[in-house]
Image (cartoon, rainbow, N blue to C red):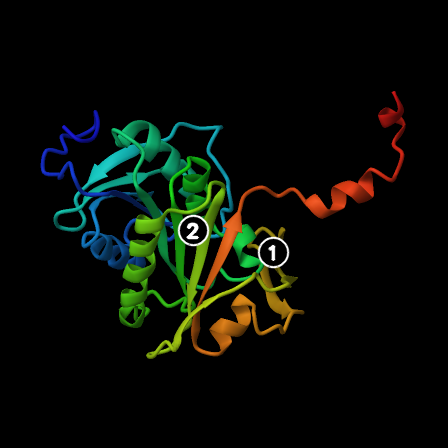
Amino acid sequence: MHFVKIRNFATMSTNRPIILVVNDDGIAAPGIRVLANLMKQLGDVVVVAPDSPQSAMGHAITISKPLRLEKVDVYDDIEMYQCSGTPVDCVKLAVNKVLHRKPDLCVSGINHGSNSSINVIYSGTMSAAMEGAIENIPSVGFSLCDYAHQADFEPVKKQVLEIASLVLQNGLPQGTLLNVNFPKTPTIKGIKICRQALAKWKEEFDERLDPSQRTYYWLTGVFDLFDHGQDTDEWALANGYTSVVPVQFDFTAHHVINILNTWNFDAQKG
């Protein structure tokens, strides 16, 4: 038996890579169907995904209520589980309760919408992949710059397979993962290895009144791009290329350590 306690994975091959597929759009999203079916060409697939959309959850985990994990039959020939928690919860449960061992690859997506630039901070898609990397699993987050439910994933399939295959073959340095974004275009020019563009969201809050005359807000905003370098993910996407950004979860600003050491904190004098 290759996998776990919850179900007999007797149909799984013992000599193929194990690929964990997760997302933040929910288990019924078209993007995860495309990704799971593509990964079947590379290995034995297990899907663990939220039971409802969890976009922009970042790296949230569930600690104040129980988590539910339920086996479902959504797609033929793919072992699938839906989780009541966040995308990161899905990875944690997959590693600790579903799989017999750590998978050879964790792929997240394909997200409906961009996770380029500053969006990586808020993204549930990328946080799920990041949790995979924290578990020392080679991990990739895939996103298509099309928010439509019926987005056309056909143009990106070849590159998804290529990138996932290369990560399986070569691995990734410990503590890193890949943030892959596809432009919304019928013909992608190629792949660009990029840095994350400097940008932010300029938030606006639409203030309204509910029937009880109590104020509530809808978050809206404008994407504000400050960085027009031709080596950025935003430039690549705007010019018809897939952007691949290597990401790390060590947030230390190493270049600032020497600056802080010149500040002569009192505690450093002891």
Q: Is residue 99 above or below residue 138?
A: above
Name the quarter where the C terminus is drawn. top right
Residue in front for this viewpoint, 218 or 195: 195
Indicate the secondary structure of the residue bearing disc 2.
helix
Give the label, 2 or 1, closer to the camera: 2
Position of residue 58 relative to residue 93, above or below, is below
Image coords of residue 161 (percent x, y): 28, 60
Q: Residues within 10 Å of mark 1 (few under 14, many from 20)?
A: few
- Residue at 21%, 55% (x, y): give it: 37
Q: Is residue 6 above or below residue 74?
A: above
The quarter of the picture where the N terminus appears is top left
Q: How many numbered marks are there? A: 2
Where does label 1 land, which residue?
A: 217
Specify the farthest residue to the front.
Answer: 170
Residue positioned 54% across, 70% down in the render: 234
Is residue 26 in sight in this rendering?
A: no
Q: Which residue occupies 87% across, 40% down? A: 262
Query: Within 10 Å of the Cα at label 2, are there few (<14), some (14-19), or many (20+) other Cα atoms?
Result: many
Between 95 and 73, the one nearer to me in the picture: 95
Amino acid type, callout 2: Thr
Q: Which residue is mark 2?
A: 125
Q: Residue at x 34, y 65 (%)?
A: 149
User: Is there any visible trace of residue 99 in the rendered image?
Assistant: yes
Assign a secondary structure to mark 1: strand
Instruction: Please state which amino acid type lies under the numbered disc 1.
Output: Tyr
For residue 184, above or below residue 204 = below
Name the N-terminal-most of marks 2 and 1.
Answer: 2
Residue 24: where, in percent of width, then height?
39, 50
- The x, y position of residue 247, in whole percent, is 51, 51
Q: Quadrant of residue 189?
A: bottom left
